[in-house]
């Protein structure tokens, strides 16, 4: 009896939930004038276009050295943005964590910085910074840096909070000073998670750097933009391909590192 | 003068609940004291007032020559180096080795820089190994702490507190997460610390029988108040009923066995 009632209730909930989703999808498509069927219908055409234009030719391969140079520039910039952001984030993370935060004002400040820089997308940062720094690599670097600080601070606060509360209490009870506790209990305990987050950030930044590069005219994003605007689609294909390879390689490397340290 | 004097200690947490009311007692050097009482009676808070891991709201705590409530940062640190602490969940750094965790007990004696760089003297290292040997876990010295069993981890905790060369050790439910065998090992070690090294032990316990058989003296705490304070052999079933608010035989048996 009870089981039946519950089953019926479940059924009702599922139906209501599905109806809501369908109505929402229909409404939003209707309001924006977007036709799902039309969108799906043009898909084959798009695929045909991709295959007939985006392929790598002998000619475009000659551009490979320049593209690779730009790609390496982009990767290095992403790594630099991540590592410098890490230094700032460790400090903010320690301030923002409940276990290691020294006073409330600094904690609120750290979390405020984290949420502001995280909730504004990297692309928006790039556009904002473009106004004051102009189209150069500093702008791209700063955009990635700001985004990374937000994300890493948030991640570090959580790692520190969950990993080290009890050990921090114990060391406090032995009379250890703040920095001794941080170096002897917090950092050793959180290091693997922190490194994991840093690796994730490097991957994300390399992906973002392409987009940011289009806006700021630097790195691989600039090459992409340049070839795209000069209708050199073969070169565009090569750029895309090399980005994909680079991202996959970085991901494989960081996965391997993660496996070793965790 | 007694080693530890607690006078009319009161503690209220932010939510307005009064956890400790008018608690007074004295502990002499070399005593083994158990504090018993139901969960939420304020046992942990009482222990943490002694080394000021929680702030003291009312009353006074005197330890050795320290007035615990009125210490500046430097003296508070000095106080804490004199007081060892053992926790229910051992509170070690799980990813570090046993020996590193034991040496953490010396951090209170070091400057920040020495501590951060991990500069421990040969003497301290020898002492750490000596303690591990005494506690029977010398062969695990280089293992990571999270590879040890609960009883072994608690022994690392004891070694960490002993290397502080404390005058008193506060134990916050040291055996609550351990099986009976490991519990016995830990309690035996704590007892021998008091007997051999003349270090005072104050132990929060849930098991009345263990409290009775190991300690010289028992303090019963109920809703933040001391309702029993006397030699263990004078703890009667009536006292236990008052401490735990038990009336029927079944619950009492659950507590005392």
Image: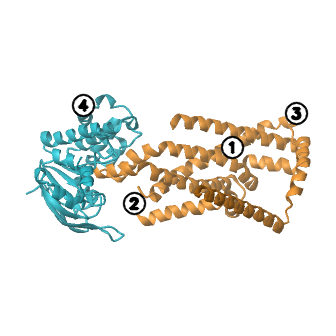
Chain colours: A orange, B cyan
C-beta proximity under 8 Å, tags 3 and 2? no
Tag in front: 3 or 2:
2
Q: Position of residue A25 (x, y in %)?
A: 78, 62
- Of A113 and B137, the residue lying toward us: B137
In the image, farthest residue toward the front: A1
CB-based contact (under 8 Å), mark 4 and mark 3: no
The residue mark sitting in front, 4 or 2, is 4
Element type at mark 4: helix
Q: Nearer the viewer, residue A175 or B98?
A: B98
Residue that numbered label 1 is attached to: A73
Q: Where in the figure is residue A43, as x and y percent of width and height?
A: 88, 49
**Are labels 4 and 3 on one chain?**
no
**Residue A58: assigned label:** 3
* Any part of residue B5 in sight: no
Whichever of callouts 2 and 1 sits on the residue coming sooner in the sequence is 1
Disc 3/disc 1 C-alpha distance (Å): 24 Å
Along the line of sight, the residue nearer the viewer: A10 or A53: A10
- Does the image show residue B31? yes
| Snapshot quadrant of residue A9 | bottom right
The picture quadrant where one finds residue B90 is: top left
């Amino acid at each position: 009896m009870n089981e039946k009632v519950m089953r019926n209730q479940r059924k009702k909930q599922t139906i209501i939930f599905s109806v809501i989703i369908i109505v929402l999808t229909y409404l939003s498509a209707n309001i924006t004038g977007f036709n799902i069927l039309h969108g799906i219908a043009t898909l084959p055409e798009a695929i045909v276009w991709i295959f007939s234009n985006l392929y790598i030719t002998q000619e475009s391969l000659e551009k490979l050295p320049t593209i690779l140079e730009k790609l390496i520039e982009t990767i290095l910039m992403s790594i630099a943005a991540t590592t410098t952001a890490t230094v700032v984030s460790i400090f903010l993370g320690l301030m923002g964590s409940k276990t290691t935060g020294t006073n409330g004002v600094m904690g609120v400040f750290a979390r405020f910085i984290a949420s502001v820089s995280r909730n504004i997308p990297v692309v928006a940062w790039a556009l904002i910074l473009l106004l004051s720094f102009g189209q150069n690599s500093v702008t791209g670097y700063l955009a990635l840096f700001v985004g990374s600080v937000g994300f890493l601070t948030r991640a570090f606060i959580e790692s520190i909070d969950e990993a080290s509360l009890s050990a921090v209490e114990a060391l406090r009870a032995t009379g250890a000073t703040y920095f001794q506790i941080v170096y002897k209990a917090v950092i050793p305990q959180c290091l693997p998670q922190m490194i994991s987050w840093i690796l994730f950030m490097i991957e994300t930044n390399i992906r973002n750097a392409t987009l940011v590069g289009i806006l700021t005219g630097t790195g691989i994003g600039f090459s992409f933009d340049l070839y795209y605007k000069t209708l050199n689609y073969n070169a565009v294909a090569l750029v895309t391909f090399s980005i994909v390879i680079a991202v996959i390689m970085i991901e494989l490397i960081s996965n391997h590192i993660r496996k070793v340290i965790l | 003068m007694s080693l530890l004097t607690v006078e009319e200690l009161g503690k209220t947490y932010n939510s307005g609940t009064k956890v400790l009311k008018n608690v007074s007692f004295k502990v002499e050097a070399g005593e083994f004291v158990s504090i018993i009482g139901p969960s939420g009676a304020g046992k942990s808070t009482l222990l943490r007032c002694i080394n000021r891991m929680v702030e003291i709201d009312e009353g006074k705590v005197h330890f050795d020559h320290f007035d615990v409530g009125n210490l500046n940062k430097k003296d508070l640190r000095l106080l804490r180096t004199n007081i060892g602490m053992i926790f229910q969940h051992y509170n070690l750094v799980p990813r570090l080795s046993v020996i590193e965790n034991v040496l953490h007990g010396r951090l209170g004696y070091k400057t920040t820089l020495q501590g951060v760089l991990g500069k421990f003297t040969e003497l301290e290292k020898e002492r750490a190994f000596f303690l591990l040997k005494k506690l029977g876990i010398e062969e695990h010295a280089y293992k990571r702490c999270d590879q040890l069993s609960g009883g072994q981890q608690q022994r690392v905790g004891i070694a960490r507190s002993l290397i502080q060369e404390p005058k008193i050790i506060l134990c916050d439910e040291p055996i609550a997460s351990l099986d009976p065998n490991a519990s016995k090992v830990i309690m035996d070690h704590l007892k021998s610390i008091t007997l051999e090294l003349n270090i005072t032990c104050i132990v929060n316990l849930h098991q009345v029988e263990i409290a009775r058989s190991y300690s010289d003296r028992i303090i019963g705490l109920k809703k933040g108040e001391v309702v029993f304070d006397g030699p263990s052999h004078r703890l009667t079933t009536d006292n236990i009923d008052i401490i735990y608010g038990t009336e029927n035989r079944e619950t009492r048996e659950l507590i005392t066995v």
